[in-house]
C-alpha cells in the first residue's frame, strides 16, 4: 500500500528500520531532520522518485491526558501553530486505522519547538483541539500535498500530558539535528523528567517497530 515511510533520523529511524527488516518489498525509508526542515528533505526525495502513497511516522508527545504512552495514534489531519490544517488522505487513513493496536484521532499539532511542560501540553491540546504534538508532520504533509502525493500520519506516544520532560529547546540545531551535549545537560538538570522521557521512549520504540512491520504488510505497493 505504501511506497515510502517518512521518519525522523535517529532512534525513530532505527526503530522503523528494525521493523522492516526481512520484509520483501518493504517501503522506501526517508529519514528527515527534526522540525520543518523535514519538508526540504521530503521535497528532494519525491523529486527523484515517483512516490504515490506515503506514511509519515515517528513518536509524539501527548496533549490529551486520557491518551497513554505507547499508544499508536492515526490522525485525520495536522494543524500548525497558525491554525492552518491539512487533511490526510482518507483512504490511507482508514487503512491505517484498520490495523490492529491503533487508535484513530482527529488532529495532530505540529509545533516549532519541543513542548516540555505538562501545563503547556494540556493548554495547547485544548486550544488546537489536538490529541498530540510533534515537530515534523505538518510540514511533511504540506510538502507531499504540493506534489499531489497521498499521505497518512501515524505516531506512537512517547510522553504523556501529565508529566514534564526536559527542556530540549536549546538542544536542537538550526538544521534540525540534535546537539548531544546539550541534550545530556538538559537531562541532568531535570532528572525526574528525564526518567519519564527515557521510560516513554523505551516503551514507544518497540511499538514503532511493530507499526512499521504492519505498514509494510498492509498491502501491495503502487507502481
Image (spheres, grey):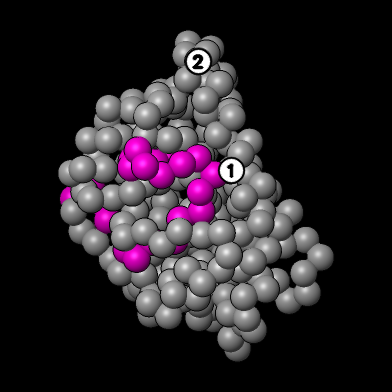
Instruction: Please determine whether, in this image, residue 36 is positioned above or below residue 185.
Output: below
Residue nearest the observer in this picture, 80 or 194: 194
| Coordinates of residue 214 in the picture (x, y in percent) | 64, 66
| Coordinates of residue 155 in the picture (x, y in percent) | 48, 53
Q: Secondary structure at mark 1?
A: helix
Instruction: Please determine whether, in this image, residue 17 is positioned above or below residue 34.
Output: below
Residue 123, located in which quarter of the rendered image? top left
Residue found 68% across the figure and 63% down from its top: 213
**Residue 45 seen by the camera:** no
| Coordinates of residue 115 in the picture (x, y in percent) | 35, 33
Which stretch did the figure color magenta? 61-82
Which residue has dot 2 on it? 192
Q: Does the magenta portion include 3?
A: no
Instruction: Please determine whether, in this image, residue 107 is positioned above or below residue 151.
Output: above
Residue found 46% across the figure and 41% down from its top: 68
Tag of residue 9: none
**Residue 188 seen by the camera:** yes
Callout 1 crowding tier (Cα within 10 Å): few <14, some 14–19, many ≥20: many
Residue nearest the observer in this picture, 142 or 204: 204
Instruction: Please determine whether, in this image, residue 129 is positioned above or below residue 21.
Output: above
Which residue has dot 1 on it? 204
Q: Is residue 125 left or right of residue 175?
A: left
Q: Secondary structure at mark 2?
A: helix
The quarter of the rendered structure image containing the C terminus is: bottom right
Q: Does the magenta portion include 80?
A: yes
Amino acid at each position: 500500500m505504501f511506497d515510502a515511510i517518512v521518519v525522523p533520523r535517529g532512534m525513530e529511524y532505527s526503530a522503523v528500520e528494525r521493523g522492516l527488516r526481512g520484509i520483501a518489498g518493504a517501503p522506501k525509508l526517508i529519514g528527515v531532520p527534526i522540525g520543518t526542515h523535514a519538508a526540504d528533505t521530503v521535497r528532494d526525495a519525491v523529486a527523484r522518485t515517483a512516490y504515490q502513497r506515503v506514511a509519515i511516522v515517528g513518536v509524539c508527545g501527548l496533549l490529551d491526558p486520557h491518551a497513554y504512552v505507547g499508544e499508536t495514534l492515526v490522525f485525520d489531519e495536522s494543524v500548525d501553530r497558525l491554525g492552518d490544517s491539512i487533511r490526510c488522505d482518507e483512504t490511507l487513513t482508514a487503512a491505517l486505522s484498520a490495523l490492529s493496536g491503533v487508535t484513530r484521532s482527529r488532529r495532530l499539532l505540529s509545533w516549532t519547538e519541543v513542548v516540555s511542560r505538562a501545563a503547556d501540553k494540556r493548554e495547547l491540546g485544548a486550544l488546537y483541539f489536538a490529541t498530540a504534538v510533534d515537530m515534523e508532520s505538518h510540514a511533511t504533509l504540506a510538502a507531499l500535498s504540493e506534489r499531489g502525493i497521498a499521505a497518512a500520519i501515524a505516531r506512537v506516544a512517547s510522553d504523556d500530558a501529565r508529566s514534564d520532560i526536559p527542556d530540549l529547546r536549546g538542544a536542537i540545531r538550526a538544521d534540525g539535528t540534535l546537539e548531544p551535549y546539550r541534550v545530556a545537560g538538559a537531562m541532568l538538570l531535570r532528572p525526574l523528567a528525564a526518567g519519564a522521557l527515557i521510560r516513554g521512549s523505551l516503551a514507544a520504540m518497540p511499538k514503532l517497530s511493530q507499526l512499521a512491520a504492519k505498514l509494510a504488510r498492509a498491502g501491495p505497493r503502487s507502481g
